[in-house]
Amino acid sequence: MALPIRYEVVRRWVDDEDVLEEVLARVVDVDGLFEDVPPAPRGRLVLRGCTAGTLDGDVQLEVQGSPDSELWRLADLVVHADLGDGDLVATATATCLLDSEDLGPSPRFILSQHSKEIGTCVAVEGLPREHRGVAPPVTLIGCDTPELIRPGRPDGERGPYVGLRALDPDGRVVAHAGVALDVVSVSPSAVGEGLFDVVLDQSGDAWHIAERPVPAARGAWRIWMEGVPAQRNLWAPLSSEGRLWWNEIAAKARRNRPVAGVHDVDGTYANDECGVHLALSEALVGPGDYLGGVHSITGAYEEWWFVPGITLVWHQPRVALESVPEHFYGLMKYLLRNGVEVLFEPSEPDFSYRLDRGVELGGLVDRWITGWARAAEIDPPDALLDNWHVWADLPGREEERVLTGDAMVAEHAEDVALNPVPTWLTVPTRSPDEVGLVVEEAGLVLRETEAFMVRGLLDHPAPKPPDGYELRVTPGDVIEVVVTCDGEVAASGRMAVVGEDAVPHDVRTAPDHRRRGLGSVVMGALAREAVKAGASEGLLCATDDGWHLCRKLGWDTICDVVVASNDKGEA
């Protein structure tokens, strides 16, 4: 009886846009593929000049040098003695996550916990630089042509990239694994005559065809290697990490567009973010199909599956609400905002009410940000699951993340805190104090809270300029208004018109001309010209000074807007 071939040993060559995979050998099975790299042994560290308070548990150490930097994980760090002057004797399991060749003469040592900086050191002694994590050997069981397996000599960027590819019974490639092809031994295999067991050493350098799968990936690989899944919830027994690997494999599978109609979601096992995603994916496109990433369900394919007439009936929503409430809220809100009807079985009236309010607020944010970007003359923002990414390219504000509500604020704040460039986080919310505490705990710096405001424009006040002032209006998609006095600019402002919406921006009055009603003159002229261009409603985010002006002109406050930054540049 012929045994099934489950793996192939391959080399990949890249030539311009052409990719060629050369099969070197066929293999019945592989042992050792899903083994972890052994960690460094626990050792003693001396932290010199440490400014952190209590040090305990898992700590991240960033060594900022020039030109290179390093990143270390100090697992289960325990301080045993305080020598004074911030010198601490500790033990930890130190693992190098990012290595370097040249830190320069005076690197900085920064300690962090839970994505938040907790202190610095002058130096850290005892890091196990001699330890090099080496993956265990991999054994090819039942290999047909071991004589063809060889490392290959790298040739520029062409390769070869080496490794294995896993197959299902139909010969479809399920996944790739990076494995070095340094042969240690070849011996006859017990699985069949003419087949061999080949041990491959993994201590050398190689250009891998893909990353090597971790132990948590084993279950997902095994299921897919039995064939494309044809029933739901086969991923349910997997860990959160294993479910992520499941979705990575699915990304290489077929892609079917959802159709209009009622789709039932089995939420029984949606007890983590990936479980929520896989339950939704199987309801919309079926088991074994792909519906984008966990945090970007459409990615570049928004028009690909947001077809009219989709209704989701989410069964057992309480599982997700108790396990990942903010992620589930953000996802449901995103679906509703894009025209998908969502029903819950059994019903969740309190959650549904919150969703309705969140969708309403998110829709207003969507309308505002489009006009704001146009008025500010910056690139159109990128729409993501529950936020907009803005490439602001402003001093002290290279990027900005604008949320469509206050779901998952902690996760977003931690993300922004880790961004290496100056980044702002903007959160429309009806709970500003609570949101402010959350973003500060993530290490962000609070800026002035603003107000999100709205007003109908058809009856907007439009006072005339005082004596001695002249008003100049320049119409267009972005209206410009300038008030001058003796040829000097006394006040100015801009307003972008997008359909029936108008968004004011950068309305300002020169210090020598304040308290003369010029802000009202500018706002009135902008509103009047926007109505001529087809706008009927205005949206804006106002500072405290702007709020007082807009309130006087009849603008209503929708909610507060908490603004924070990672403080990596002056604004």
Image (spheres, helix red, strand yellow):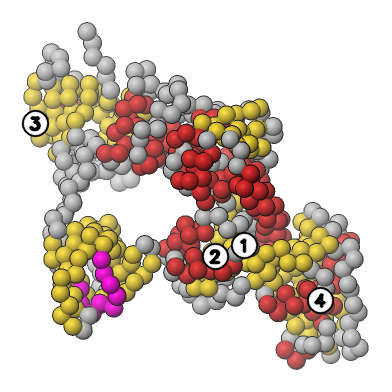
Q: Earlier in the sequence, mark 2 or mark 1?
A: 1
State the residue position of label 2.
435
Q: CA distance from mark 4 to mark 2?
A: 28 Å
Q: Residue at x 77, y 73 (%)?
A: 550
Q: Give the mark nearer the N terminus: 1 vs 3.
A: 3
The residue carrying pointer 4 sits among few (fewer than 14), some (14 to 19) or many (20 or more) residues within 10 Å by Cα, namely few
Vertical placement of 543 versus 199: above or below?
below
Q: Residue at x 55, y 33 (%)?
A: 315
Give the residue type at disc 1: Thr
**Displayed quadrant of residue 75:** bottom left
Q: Which residues are magenta?
A: 47-56
Is 168 positioned to the left or the right of 46 in the image? right
Camera-nearest label, 2 or 3? 2
| Residue 108, horizontal then vertical, whole percent | 29, 74
- To which residue does mark 4 refer? 552
Is 402 positioned to the left or the right of 521 in the image?
left
SS under mark 2? helix
Query: Where is mark 1, residue-wise?
Result: 429
Q: CA distance from mark 2 to mark 1?
A: 8 Å
Is label 4 or label 2 in front?
Answer: 2
Per the model, the C-alpha gap separating discs 1 and 3 is: 64 Å
Q: Residue at x 11, y 20 (%)?
A: 189
Disc 4 element? helix
First reached walking from the N terminus: tag 2 or tag 3: 3
Could you say where residue 194 lies in the image, as x and y percent from the top left? 13, 15
Q: Residues within 10 Å of mark 3 (few under 14, many from 20)?
A: few
Q: Quadrant of the N terminus?
A: top left
